[in-house]
Image: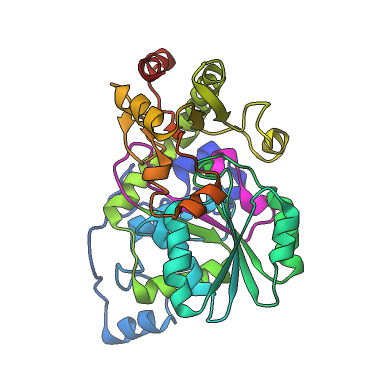
Amino acid sequence: MSDDQNDYYLDTLAVRAGQVRTAEGEHAEPIFPTSSYVFDSAAAAAARFSGDEPGNIYSRFTNPTVRTFEQRLAALEGGERCVATASGMSAIYATCAGILRQGDHIISSRSIFGSTVILFNNFLAKFGIEVSYVEQANMDSWSAAIKPNTRLMFLETPSNPLTEIADISKLASLAHDHDCLLVVDNCFCTPVLQRPLELGADIVIHSATKYIDGQGRCIGGAVVGSEQCVGGDVYGFLRTAGPTMSPFNAWVFLKGLETLGLRMERHCKSAHAVADWLQQQDHVERVYYPGLESHPQHQLANEQMKGYGGIVSFEVKGGKSAAWQLIDATKMLSITANLGDTKTTITHPATTTHGRLTPEEREQAGISDGLIRLSIGLEDIRDIKDDLVRGL
């Protein structure tokens, strides 16, 4: 692998970046299931622990397999540094805990994952961190929410589950004009479809559990950004607090990255076909998919994304009872809240992913009782449609 990763295109980076072969000359990346490392001398150990000499210290924060995954994902996102974590939620928490202080203020989109709202409201608030929620696609609401102590702006684009798109470039400019950081959860797109750092974002968050793995096998997360911010503040938190990715999971994610481009292409193609088809069904009230011309940010999606993703959400007539009836009528689709899998999944956000929110919070986020979220997998599109027809 060249030292200059800019010499390679994205699909090559997904297969090659970050690998350093051992003396065994292995072709595939090895797994290092070790908790600790042996030093040549007491002086060598002291030099590692003090930071005077680079190298492995303890697998809570230095592991060769995890490091390979970090370097590969950083190369794909165009970032200087990546810190891998135990889950997507721990990636968000490590970012906030590493960067923010008591009295700081976060501006967050309302259109975010339910557990992220709980993290902000129930736990960050305990440490004196204030959070304001705004309409994701409304730039005026972001501007109006800025305070002298605003330190961080957070969003998912596309959002979960309504696939709202935010203008990353404009939000980055707004954040930097007020000396704060823009953090973008890029879980739905992955670097194959969207590279927020190129659009001006400061930090990218991933739940590697989703499309990066791609087969629903492991839990993991990642934070990508600058050496100073991610390599300093976020890594410093991980080193001490230890929300660490396991070497085995890192190895699984490395294998997932190798096929990420191919899988995302198929996810996008099938999801677009399902979204088009759902629009024609009598019992469907509305379909949410950035690839549809009816989507309010369709043009913006064309400008900042290379594909529309694999998530399709839709509202059925009849509310919760109709939604549950449709979900229960399917035979092939997996009723699970996970997404990004080779297997198509179906869930009812109001009672699962966003079930811990209050009814008022769900209403503000646009999560209706009749809303259903699909994560379109790699099955034959005809079988996906046939299974949905049972409920429709």
Colour mapping: rainbow
Q: Residue at x 35, y 67 (%)?
A: 62
**Residue 2 percent across, percent down from the top left:** 53, 49
Q: Quick check: 346 above or below 199?
A: above
The residue under the point 54% across, 54% down is 3
Residue 203 highlighted magenta (yes or no) = yes
Would residue 295 be found to the left or right of residue 353 on screen? Answer: right
Task: Give yes or no for residue 28 being in the magenta stretch.
Answer: no
Residue nearest the observer in this picture, 224 or 365: 365
Residue 54, can we see it? no
Please state if 17 lies on the left or on the right of 196 as rendered. left
Q: Would residue 16 be seen by someone viewing this image from the given angle?
A: yes
Q: Residue 375, how many percent across, how many down?
A: 43, 33
Q: Position of residue 234 (x, y in %)?
A: 48, 70
The magenta segment? 191-219
Q: Is residue 221 above or below residue 330?
A: below
Quadrant, the C terminus: top left
How many marks on residues? Answer: 0
Q: Quadrant of residue 46?
A: bottom left
Picture quadrant where residue 10 is located: top right
Residue 67 in the image, given as x and y percentages of width and height: 40, 59
Along the viewing direction, whichever of 309 and 148 lies nearer the viewer: 148
Between 57 and 149, which is closer to the camera in this rendering? 149
Image height check: is 47 above or below 337? below
Q: Which residue does the image show at 38% across and 54% down from the upper left?
A: 356
Residue 127 in the figure: left or right of residue 276 = left
Q: Residue at x 42, y 68 (%)?
A: 122
